[in-house]
Image (tube, rainbow, N blue to C red):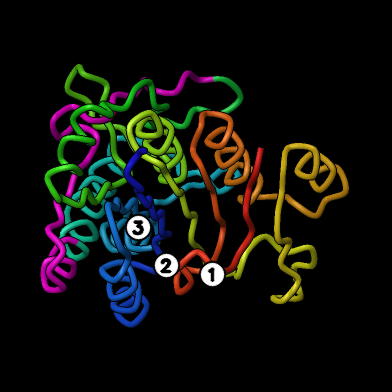
Amino acid sequence: MKEQLTIIKVGGKIVEEETSLARLLDDFAALPGRKLLVHGGGRSATRLAERLGIESRMVDGRRITDADTLRVVTMVYGGLVNKNIVAGLQARSVNALGLTGADMDVIRSAKRPVKDVDYGFVGDVERVDATLLGDLIDRGIVPVMAPLTHDGRGHILNTNADTIAGETAKALASRFDVTLMYCFEKKGVLSNADDDESVIPAIDRHTFETLVADGTIAGGMKPKIENALAAVDAEVSRVIITRADAIDGRSGTVVTR
């Protein structure tokens, strides 16, 4: 029987505010068994870029990453945000290790080709080293993954944190019984954006296509659920979309095959 592994993905808003970060770290430290954390940090990157006089440009919620912006996100994601989380977990007796995809070559990406939009130095994941990550996890180490990868030719690439979580979960599913949780500010996927209690309890591919067609699911939630569906198709046992203060897995929207 495979050992259980819980992968938590949290957005920048949660890890960038002192109170919500402390609550998350307490809850994460209390999770039983093997675990891994993937984090964002976009709001901090935007604030630092503004202070440095660098314009932040977004298309459909995705950051355009030119050379100056790449320097900012590398500092913020791989440094400030990642190491604050690692230090906080160490204070809670969790033996955490902060990683970008470049560290130990754990996640290799290719620079996104230019089509309708030139996203700049943005990476699309090509492979995750499940053997190396799995060995770390088996040793009791808790990886904390920043949303940065590399192309193997010396270039850091800004990479969507939801994608990193999904690809990491899929890669590790052959070795562990994986539960993947996408955490954000709502209790789950809502049928009514104005009603925080209108959580859709379960979504499969057919339900997803129906909800996209009628406009219930749109914007940033669409790629999040697409990542979740791809994960369960790749033998990830469970994917849950929920609030960051509900990582016990008892509430939220469950994405199923």
Alpha-carbon span between mark 1 and mark 2: 9 Å
Seen in the image, is 21 located left or right of residue 196? Answer: left
**For the residue labelled by badge 2, is the local secondary structure a helix, a strand or a loop?**
helix
Is residue 103 in the magenta section? Answer: yes
Could you say which quadrant of the image residue 148 lies in? top left
Q: Residue at x 20, y 44 (%)?
A: 137
The span picked out in magenta is 86-114
Q: Residue at x 21, y 48 (%)?
A: 143
Which corner quadrant holds the N terminus? top left
Q: Earlier in the sequence, mark 1 or mark 2?
A: 2
Given residues 121 and 96, the one toward you in this image is 96
Q: Residue at x 33, y 67 (%)?
A: 15
Vertical order, 48 against 203 (above or below): below
Q: Which mark identifies residue 13? A: 2
Q: Are marks 1 and 2 in contact (CB under 8 Å)?
A: yes
Q: Residue 114 location, x and y as percent?
A: 50, 20
Is residue 97 in the magenta section? Answer: yes
Q: Please state which amino acid type lies under the numbered disc 2.
A: Lys
**For the residue labelled by badge 3, is the local secondary structure a helix, a strand or a loop?**
loop
Q: Which mark identifies residue 41? A: 3
Q: Residue 96 location, x and y as percent?
A: 15, 56
Q: Please state which amino acid type lies under the numbered disc 1.
A: Glu
Q: Residue at x 32, y 44 (%)?
A: 3
